[in-house]
Image (cartoon, grey):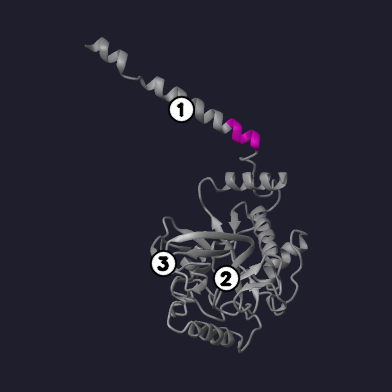
Amino acid sequence: MSKKNRKTSPSILSLTVPAALLVALGVTLSAKLGLFDPVGPVSGLVIQGPETVIIEPRQMRYRAEGHFLKRGLAVDAPLVDAALAAPFAITKYQVSRGEYRRCVEDGACQAPEAGGGGEDVPVTGVNHSDAESYARWLTAQTGEVWRLPTDEQWAFAAGSKFPDDALGIDAESDNPALRWLADYERESSRQKSPDPHPQPRGTFGENEYGVADVGGNVWEWTRTCHRRVTIGDRGEVLKEQPACGIYVVDGKHRASMSFFVREPKSGGCAVGVPPDNLGFRLVRDDRWYARMLYAYERRRAGAV
């Protein structure tokens, strides 16, 4: 009986040796691909990252992003249930002029196109590419991986200040003009900003999670692509067309901007009334494989 057991039961050695070989192979390939290369400076002083707020896991219902159509007519985006599985860190404040200026001085960022005020005023007049350049620069300076937030991450961080852009008027109502009129009135009211000039950090207060200036007069770039979605009578998605040259910007209301636009009032707003100003804040990628993923993405981008 004991002989039979010895023949059929795998030994610890027979299990651990193949696993160790696989791990060694993975490490070797990762090293050859440069996935273990440091994301920060090889030498020199590493600066401390910006102040962050931790957004803890929870569930949330919010209005989906996109331009939704049913039977060829615009409709409100559906409410979707989202679950945040793991906490993430987001900068408490929007990136300031002073912080961004250091990136410009290092030659890693383009100078902003507009905006004034002191060092603690959010940087504005920056496009999506500028924001990504700053994220790469900050990653190199801190050794931590920084990214633009997704629209969903921004919604979780905004909490009760996340806007609901629904009109609440069914496109199939007896009078379709009601929706057009409601949309016109809403867009007209959004153009009446009492003071569009960027204000110092903290002017618009903090939300329930400690994130500052959510819903102020600086809209924030995300890395979520705008999309056009056709749905059926039961709300099922029939067709989805992402447009990844256009990105969602979040603020007092959602808008979608072409990636190259720095001054929203000059044009380039794909959907909705243009924001007053374009700025951004960042999230820190604390996933255990964040550095390897970042190194892989950078190598792939460099190969294109």
Mark 2 or 3, nearer chain start = 2
Magenta-drawn stretch contains 269: no
Q: Amino acid at mark 2?
A: Tyr
Residue 53 shows in the view: no
Q: SS at mark 1?
A: helix
Q: SS at mark 3?
A: loop
Q: Amino acid at mark 1?
A: Ala
The percent position of residue 227, horizontal first and vertical second, equals: 56, 63
54 versus 37 height, above or below: below
What is the C-alpha distance between the residues marked 1 and 3? 51 Å
Please tell me which residue lies in front, 124 or 166. Answer: 166
The picture quadrant where one finds residue 225 is bottom right
What is the C-alpha distance between the residues marked 2 and 3? 42 Å
Q: Main secondary structure of the magenta part?
A: helix
Residue 136 shows in the view: yes
Q: Which residue is mark 2?
A: 93
- The residue lying at 59 percent from left, 58 percent from top is 147
- The residue lying at 73 percent from left, 67 percent from top is 101
- The residue lying at 44 percent from left, 80 percent from top is 169
- The residue lying at 62 percent from left, 40 percent from top is 35
Q: Which residue is mark 1?
A: 19
Task: Please indicate whether residue 114 sits to the left or right of residue 96 in the image.
Answer: right
The percent position of residue 221, horizontal first and vertical second, equals: 61, 67
104 versus 304 height, above or below: below
Magenta-drawn stretch contains 30: yes
Q: Which residues are magenta?
A: 28-33
The percent position of residue 280, horizontal first and vertical second, equals: 62, 68
Q: Few, some or many C-alpha atoms within 10 Å of disc 2 (few <14, some 14-19, many ≥20)?
A: many
Mark 2 and 3 residues: CB-CB less than 8 Å, in contact?
A: no
Q: Amino acid at mark 3?
A: Asp
Q: Which residue is mark 3?
A: 233
Q: Few, some or many C-alpha atoms within 10 Å of disc 3 (few <14, some 14-19, many ≥20)?
A: few
